[in-house]
Amino acid sequence: MLKVALIGSTGAVGQEFVVALHNHPWFDLTHIVSSERSAGKKYIDALRDPQSGILRWHNREQVPEYIREKVVSKMDEIDPKKFDLIFTALESDDAQVIEPRLAQHVPVISTAAAFRYENDVPILIPGINDDHTDILKKQQKERQWGGFIAPLPNCTTTGLAITLKPLIDNFGVKNVFMTSMQALSGAGRSPGVIALDILDNVIPYIPKEEEKVQIETKKILGTYDDSSQEISSNDIKVSCTCTRVPVSDGHTEVVFVETIDKADPSSVKKKMIEFSDNVSIKKLPTAPADYIVVNDDPTRPQPRVDREVNDGMTTVVGRLRKDSVFENGIKYVLLTHNEKMGSAKGAVLLAELLKTKKII
């Protein structure tokens, strides 16, 4: 068992990490870290609203027994050299300072954007760009670190990149247009979204989100050159509009793709399913039975119905149709659970991949 710490344990994503690591066969979560406000408390008490006493547990599942009595530590109480791996669920400003201090000694798997765009840092989705993990050796060498920083993408990027991968491999892709309808949980608890702003409403702008998706998608789907130890971004063009909608969990995206070769709905469905059936991470403990599901029901996917497919680790595709504008084009709707595959459980899956590749 690898000894693991979690930094940022009481937030919405941190709570998902706690669930994902419960009874994990490879990782033992021995230390949890949070803010000064929570430090010194039992985890169960740190999750209680101090004014109302109401338990602020993000999931409907109860707090796992193994974590209830564990005492939350402060950041300066943690010695990174005593761990095999550290997960972080931090805001980017905090991650910018904290994660390099940890990575000097131990591998860090991050959900923050702080280091995603640096040349020696890959943006990793297990099963999509596994070969990009090799650049972590360059990162360690050049920064003279004992560990490394390996971030996940923005949760909105995850489903888009997953569904584009089989299209790129089989038909080639020139242009992508995407509009997202993103869940409230994607904004986190702080600052979050004010209830009166989102009730009976759609917010048509999420700061920095569109830029993240457009840059990250190209990097994730780019090529790693082993000789130069560099990632070359894919030359596809990506344009998106990101919106916030009154849904608790699950990011829905409407995607239009211009392909290089002709792509009809039946052949795209076939290639997506083939990719799902043969995905590289299929045998890992947290991997879903189905990496991609293509639903023929024109009313699917729907967040309430589909976000928990395979415990939130499956990207569900529906409304797969020929596009009427592009000569070679396809359009579809996808749904990804933003806090599971798009965040905490996706990070645990990444850790499993890195372990099998003997990188941690």
Image (spheres, rainbow, N blue to C red):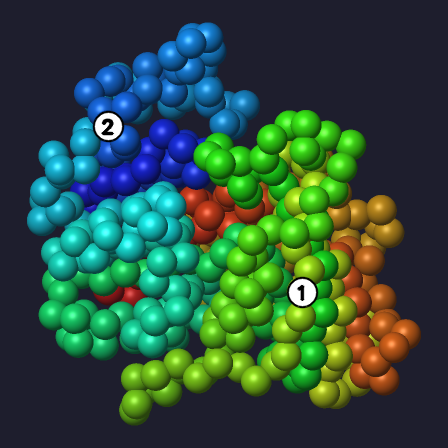
Helix, strand or loop under label 2: loop
Residue drawn 76% across the image and 69% down it: 256
Residue 18 position in % (x across, y down): 37, 33
Residue furthest top as drawn: 52
Discs 2, 1 touching: Cβ within 8 Å: no
**Which quadrant holds residue 64?**
top left
Query: Looking at the rendered structure, which numbered label has been put on residue 36?
Result: 2
Residue 312 visible in the displayed image:
yes
Residue 43 position in % (x across, y down): 30, 21
Helix, strand or loop under label 1: strand
Q: Is residue 301 left or right of residue 191?
A: right
Residue 290 visible in the displayed image:
no
Q: Which quarter of the figure is the N terminus placed in?
A: top left
Q: Is residue 220 left or right of residue 99?
A: right
Q: Give the alpha-carbon distance from disc 2 to disc 1, as whole Å.
A: 38 Å
Query: Looking at the rendered structure, which numbered label has been put on residue 76?
Result: none
Of callouts 2 and 1, which one flags the residue occurring earlier in the amino acid sequence?
Answer: 2
Residue on which disc 1 sits: 240
